[in-house]
Amino acid sequence: MSLRINDTAPDFTADSTQGTLSWHDWIGDSYAILFSHPKDFTPVCTTEFGAVARLADAFAQRNTKVAGISIDPVEEHRRWVADVEKVSGKPGGFPIIADDKLEIAKLYDMLPAEAWLPDGRTANDTATVRTTFIIGPDKKIRLQLIYPMSVGRNFDEILRALDAIRATEGAPLATPANWRPGEDMIVALSLTTEQARDKFGEVDEVLPYLRTIKAPA
């Protein structure tokens, strides 16, 4: 069965560049981002992991842990980190999970269940593996993104989506297209306009079903 928004993210235990990692325990009371890539020592993946390294402080400020994963073993990950650090100019301080038996890739529907990686495999053998999950402290999946192998991810967008998820968590609010922190937010349809005014103050009724407020502090 495919994973969906609000499903519990499957738990697992796996080796990583920071030792054995028990996924749910490692997340703890933080948000978490799990992002997969086809193979170590490939060009697009190196730029992506470099982008994540440069955003380390931004994720930490948002109580969010980040982990990468690919079908390579830990020894390969550790060698590859030097290239990531060279490209990014930053230390690769987040764990990279080893999934050389495809167990996690299959658990998270990152590639077809019948996929098999022969010896001498190349990145083309795992073309479907460029997947991103944002997971909440309750271990529920908040977001899924899947990119083709030829397209590097926009981690600024992933950070923006994380901000939107956190801003609307447990509140009768939504964010409009291209929203950035501090911009106006949309009142959920579960509230009447009067209820929204009681809760948030001034409400701009653009349309009967499109009402905005200033972003709460």
Image (cartoon, rainbow, N blue to C red):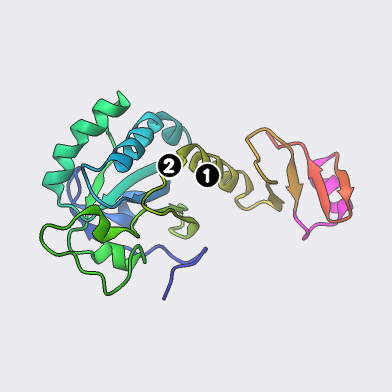
Task: Indicate left or right for 174 with 52 as reference.
Answer: right
Task: Indicate left or right for 24 with 178 as reference.
Answer: left
- In the rendered image, the vertical position of residue 44 relative to residue 5, given as above or below: above
Secondary element at image label 2: strand
Residue 206 is marked as none
Look at the numbered discs 2 and 1 and tell me whether their residues touch, using CB distance below 8 Å: yes
Q: Name the residue under label 1.
A: 162
The image position of residue 49, as x and y in percent, is 32, 38
Q: How crowded is mark 1: few (under 14 residues within 10 Å), some or many (20 or more)?
A: many
Position of the C terminus, as image quadrant, is top right
Secondary element at image label 1: helix
What is the spatial separation of the Cα atoms under label 2 and label 1, in whole angstroms?
9 Å
The image position of residue 86, as x and y in percent, is 24, 26
Task: Indicate left or right for 123 with 179 as reference.
Answer: left
The amino acid beneath tag 1 is: Leu
Q: Does 211 appear in magenta?
A: no
Task: Name the quadrant containing residue 120.
Answer: bottom left
Task: Name the quadrant containing residue 59.
Answer: top left
Q: Give the range drawn in magenta.
A: 188-201
If you read the primary sequence from the N terminus, does the residue marked by circle 2 or circle 1 appear first?
A: 2
The amino acid beneath tag 2 is: Thr
- In the rendered image, the vertical position of residue 187 relative to residue 41, given as above or below: below
Residue at 41% x, 76% y is 1
Q: Name the residue under label 2.
A: 64
Q: Does 197 appear in magenta?
A: yes
